Image (cartoon, grey):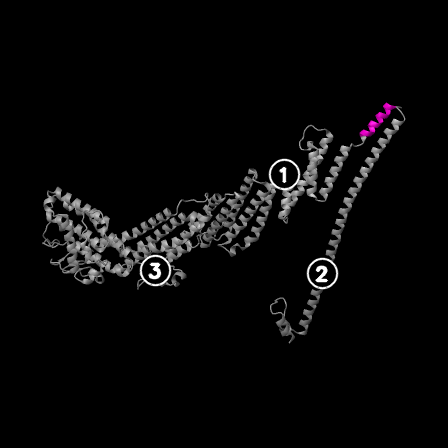
Amino acid sequence: MESSEEEEDFPFIESITPQSEIDSLYQSHTEKGIRKVCCELIDLKDAVENLCGNMQTKYLAFLRLSEEVVEMEHELIELRKHISAQRILVQDLMTGVCRELEEYNSANGDIGDSQQDLQVDELQSSLPSETDIRKALFLENIDLLLAEHKVEEAIEALEAEEKNCPELKGPGDTSSMEASYRSAFLKRKSMLEDQLNEITEQPSVGILELKKALSSLIKLGKGPLAHQQLLKSYGSRLQKSIEVFLPSCPLYPKTFPATLSRLMFSVISATTKESGSIFGDNPVYTNRLVQWAEWEIEYLVRLVKNNAPSSETVFALGAASNCVQASLTYCSMLESQGLKLSKLLLVLLRPYIEEVLELNFRRARREALDVAEMDENSLLSPRSMSPLSAFATSSDSVLVDSGMKFMGIVEDILSQLTPMAVLHYGANVLTRISLLFDKYMDMLFKSLPGPSDDDNLTELKEVIHFRAETDSEQLALLGLAFTILDELLPLAVMKVWSLKNDSKDFESENTVPNASITPELKEWKRNLQHSFDKLRDHFCRLYVLSFIYSREGKTRLNALIYLNGEGEDLYWDPDPLPSLPFQALFAKLQQLAIVAGDVLLGREKIQKILLARLTETVVMWLSEEQEFWDVFEDESVPLKPLGLQQLILDMHFTVEIACFAGYPSRHVHQIASAIIARAIRTFSARGIDPQSALPEDEWFVETAKTAINKLLLGTSGSDASEIDEDHIILHDEIVSDSDDTASSLSSIESVESFASASMGELDSPVHFTDPEG
């Protein structure tokens, strides 16, 4: 029962062992074991008693010794006073004897005047004068004050003596007696300076005592020494605080620079205030203070670098950003005290910040491009929460995982940045993000099938973890890249960049490195767009080349179809149509629009961009294909006006496709105009008059629009003609080589699916000469 009560009385005291635990611990011991434990306890008790006795004895001896030292000091002081009194008594006695001798001689006449005067003079010369006595008493008093450490009284006495004896302040022409007194005076003054220095160098000296000692040094004419001791004292205090804090830096890898900055700049601020209150605005002392503060800031930067985590980790980036934020904030506060240290701090931090950024983005490139090793966080993160999840295919999710991993890495880096870090190093970060995005686009670039893909060269290619083979996979890849470019990256960056506005309140006129952040963001967006354009153009080039060239390498878009009006490639009737390759182009773009509407649902912008670029790529290829134009320039090949008319109609038809589908392109308009102008020049050089052979421009525009209506509604009066047996066959409908992407021009669904265009859009004429077409 007693043991349970003890446990209840001391439930939270770990040093007291309850009786129940003692019983359970020693209950199994034998009598021999218990006797052994008792002997050990008795020995331990004796040792404790001996230790306590020795400690008490030594403590009493220390007290006795301290009392004896105090008594001895008092006795020495009394002895000095007694000696001084005896000396005064002797001097008074000798003075009295001399006076009595003079009186005696004057009373006895002038007997032996000359001899007596000589004796008196010798006696008086051997005795000290009143001035010498006063000086000796002064030196004894100073020695007494120094022995008693009465610094203020000693300084007052020294100042009073200097006023009474101006020769003490300068060497001048003095006698040997005065020179010796001056030397003794300066010696006492030096002893007082040493005492004051000892006070300032004591680790436990208080602020008030330090200020008194420094003020005393200034009174002694040692202002530079006093200022040096002030800086030294505060520097030692700072060093002790840092030494106490440094062991805990690994526990706070991201925030420890802020604490170091607070310790550093709080001491600098306190030193600046004390320097101003004691020494005023003297430029000499101010310059020394600034130099000392600069040394301390250099020391701070070294401490951050030496105690920060590895430079390639996000913790190092967070530590560097926190250092910039805290240090610049404190620097702005010090500017009210006349210290402008921001420029120096930025210069000292720049190499370290750039090193951390470089290593972090190297690590980011390795991780973002390593699709094979997806980290657990990216695999376990819910894809449904990401806009990129819309591009996941049923067969493979590697593409979406890579996009989410890329954004996760970028967001992790951006989350480490503070407003001040963004303000001063944001341009560097943006440049590195654009380079990282460019590398990611290169990886997606390799995922698209290229014209050099060959099963025989498989062993020469690098490993590609994702291959976009079908139209839907390729569109998903482009949609993912565009979503990162247009939505996710700008959102992540602006979320961080908007915080930099909060830091403007702390800026000073000397800390702004850039006039505006807007040009940097615009340049960054242009760089991202350029990287995406390379991927987009590669896709469009492959897509157009697969349309123009057959599997045997033959060109479907051949100049021979424009040489005469006969043959199956060219029809001319009262309601003419574009040539079969351009009808096939219309169907191909229509099919792609259907797939894009499913894969890129809700992203009309990228749909129009891709369709417009595909149209541009076709006319660009036609403009640059020299073999196509060589046929027209060959003198042996006959040309007819009908071929020129058909070529011009095809160009108008291409422009009207873009306008009808809702993505009119100035570039398409310009290239088509250039092709028409070149064709007219070529045919004119062969003797064909365009003025008489060609109808008006309005006829081409209306004919192209009518052709689109006919193709969409399936009312073409032309008979079917086969362009390529493997790919495109035109009868009453145009069919692609891919079964799953076939599209009938005669179906109503095609009308509704082609970029959501309506027949009413054809009513707004777009003349080919309009530069805005």
Question: Is the N terminus in the top left, top right, bottom left or bottom right quadrant?
Answer: bottom right
Toward the viewer: 257 or 140?
A: 140
Q: Circle 2 sits on which residue?
A: 52
Instruction: Look at the picture and state if 155 lies above or below 528.
Output: above
Query: Is 119 one of the magenta-colored residues?
Result: yes
Asked whether disc 2 touches disc 3, contact meaning CB atoms under 8 Å apart, the reply is no
Q: Residue 537: give x, y in percent of width and height.
A: 27, 51
Instruction: Tell me whether circle 1 and circle 3 mark residues in contact (CB < 8 Å).
Output: no
Nearer the observer: mark 1 or 2; the answer is 1
- Which residue, given by chain and number where applicable, does mark 1 sit on? 222
Residue 359 visible from this viewpoint = no
Q: Main secondary structure of the magenta part?
A: helix
Q: Mark 3 sits on what residue?
A: 387
Magenta stretch in the rendered image: 112-125
* Residue lying furthest bottom: 1
In this picture, residue 251 sits left or right of residue 523: right
Badge 2: residue crowd in 10 Å (few <14, some 14–19, many ≥20): few
Residue 252 visible from this viewpoint: yes
Residue displayed at 57% across by 42% down: 276
Q: Give the amino acid type for the residue marked by disc 2 in the picture.
A: Cys
Instruction: Where is residue 232? Give x, y as percent.
Output: 59, 44
Q: Would you say 90 lies left or right of 4 here? A: right
Q: Nearer the viewer, residue 495 or 734?
A: 495
Rendered location of residue 547, percent (x, y):
21, 55
The residues tagged by marks 2 and 3 sit, at their Cα atoms, a distance apart of 76 Å
Distance (Cα) linking label 1 and label 3: 72 Å
What is the distance, in whole Å, between disc 1 and disc 2 at their CAs?
51 Å
Identify the mark nearer the N-term, 1 or 2.
Answer: 2
Horizontally, is 723 left or right of 423 in the view? left
Q: Is residue 35 above or below residue 475?
A: below
Q: Quadrant of residue 135?
A: top right
Give the mark toward the camera: 1 or 3. 1
